[in-house]
Amino acid sequence: MTTAENKLRREVIKTARALQSTGLTHGTSGNVSARYKNGMLITPSGVPYEDLKIRNVVFMDTEGGYYGDFLPSSEWRMHLDIYRNYSDAEAIVHCHSTRATALSAHNKGIPAFHYMVAVAGGDQIKCADYATFGTKALSQAMIGALEERKACLLAHHGQIAFGPSLHQAFKLAGEVEALADQYLSALVLGEPVPLSPAEMKEVLRKFKSYGKHLQALDGDDAGAFEMPQLPD
């Protein structure tokens, strides 16, 4: 393994452990991957995150072939299909975070109750139809629910998010969980009135600069804010 590959394998392990330490997942549920060469590096099946070593992370090619002594996560199809369909996806986080999973148990996504749903790239965060974990049917349902977004819920299952880096994919999963928590709280008083399509269109325009450095922005977008960095 090259130095670059070893570094990326460590980042995959670090992100998987962060899912557990931040409460975004429990036990061995969930999985993490990063695009690498003509495939991806993905967490193995059933290995506790605290026991993960560099050699446990599995390389899979674009055809679904895997190499080494460990089986890839049972959800490898979802990861592979995201990389196939989204050229900007460089890393993926799938987790069973409590609030997102609670919503998904009701086949319910997150509507535009708050403008921050735009962080996932659309005017709502959809929930994919239920299918058995690890199946092609689940992966197809997920791709349908993403629909040019970077995150979605998975019915009776959890959530999945991707980004241009492991850091950004992890942060997005955290944002989705926070939104799910807020939405569930709002539902105590009844279904909240959603923001209008026109307003969400404007929010999405402004979100094109969300998280970028000031010098990279032009015109009105220079007033946008930047996401905080995840500490080591």
Image (spheres, rainbow, N blue to C red):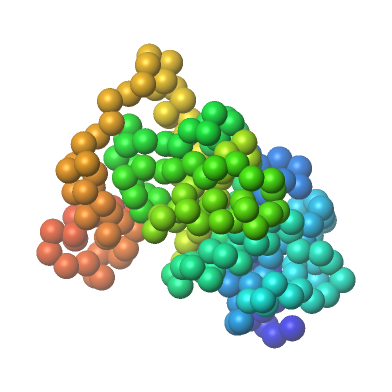
* Towards the viewer: 118 or 148: 148
**In which quadrant of the rendered view does residue 74 lie?**
bottom right
- Residue at image coords 16%, 67%: 218
Q: Residue furthest right?
A: 69
Is residue 67 visible in the rendered structure shown here? yes
* Residue 115: quadrant of the picture: top left
Q: Would you say 203 lies left or right of 173 here?
A: left
Task: List x then y, in percent, for residue 156.
Answer: 62, 36
Instruction: Name the quadrant of the C terminus.
Output: bottom right
* Residue 122 location (% of width, % of height): 34, 50
Farthest residue toward the bottom?
2
Q: Quadrant of the N terminus?
A: bottom right
Q: Is residue 108 above or below residue 91?
A: above
Q: Residue furthest left?
A: 219
Q: Is residue 35 above or below residue 26?
A: below
Front residue of 88 and 63: 63
**Residue drawn 53% across and 64% down?**
82
Q: Residue at x 74, y 59 (%)?
A: 73
Q: Extreme front residue here?
A: 137
**In the foreground, 135 or 216:** 135
The location of residue 186, given as percent across then percent down, is 39, 22
Q: Is residue 104 above or below residue 204?
A: above
From where the camera sits, is residue 171 visible?
no
Residue 229 rendering spot, x and y as whole percentages: 45, 56
Q: Residue at x 34, y 58 (%)?
A: 211
